[in-house]
Structures are given as structure tokens and as C-alpha cells.
Amino acid sequence: MVSPDLFELIGIDTIAGDLKRFRSSAEYFERNYQQLREQYPDMWLAVQEREVVAYHKTYNGLLQQLDMDVRKSVYVNRTYTGKQPTIILSAA
């Protein structure tokens, strides 16, 4: 649970704006996935405000390209040239 003090420190409008930009970037990635997959095959991408701002073959390599301020506000996902992996969740 997030402390109410955190909302006061950051500001609810700032948080709402960050979430809106993140959602917009995620939607951009999904809408343009085929083109991004061709342009950046098997790469990790950082998308910010509907633009690829960094890419790298590894997740850690991608994070090293981004400064801390940018890391907080980007959508990160990976393209696959082959079949995408299937994630299976199960309760123990």
C-alpha cells in the first residue's frame, strides 16, 4: 500500500500524468508491434511518449542506456522474431 504522504510529496496530478504517458507508450508499442519487430528484431525497447528512446539486445544493456529520470517514465518491452514465449502461472 502506498503511503498518503507519498501522494502529497509527489502530487496526485504528477502521478496521474505519468500513468497516462505510460499507458500511451504501451498502446503505441502494441499498435506498432509488427513494425517495431522488423526494425528492432529481438531487442528490448524503451518507449516514451510514442517514440523509441533506446534499444538493446539485453535488458541490463537497455537500462544502462537510460538515466534514472527516464527510467521512471518509460514503457519497456521486448520484440521477438520467432514465437513469443508462453508464460504459465500456477498456484502452488
Image: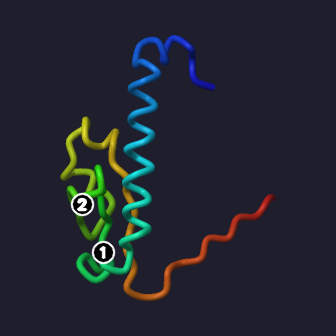
Q: In which quarter of the image is the C terminus?
A: bottom right
Count of numbered circles in the view: 2
Residue shown at 40%/79% (left/top)?
80
Query: Residue 91 placed where, x, y %?
Result: 79, 59
Q: Which amino acid does label 1 sit on?
A: Leu
Identified by mark 2, the residue type is Val
- x%, y% of residue 60? 30, 57
Real-space CA distance between mark 2 and mark 1, rounded to the nearest whole angstrom = 9 Å
Q: Residue furthest bottom?
A: 82
> Sequence order check: which comes first, mark 2 or mark 1?
1
Q: Is residue 82 left or right of residue 74?
A: right
For disc 1, the neighbor class at 10 Å (few under 14, some 14 to 19, many from 20) is some
- Compared to residue 59, the image places residue 33 above or below, namely below
Residue 48: assigned label: none
Q: Which residue is drawn at 42% across and 57% down?
A: 26
Q: What element carries label 1?
A: helix
Residue 33 is situated, as x and y percent measured from the top left of the image, at 38, 74
In the image, residue 30 above or below residue 61: below
Residue most extreme to the right: 92
Task: Write down the quadrant of residue 4 in the picture.
Answer: top right
Q: Quadrant of the N terminus?
A: top right
Which disc is residue 36 wearing?
1
Residue 84 in the image: above or below residue 5: below
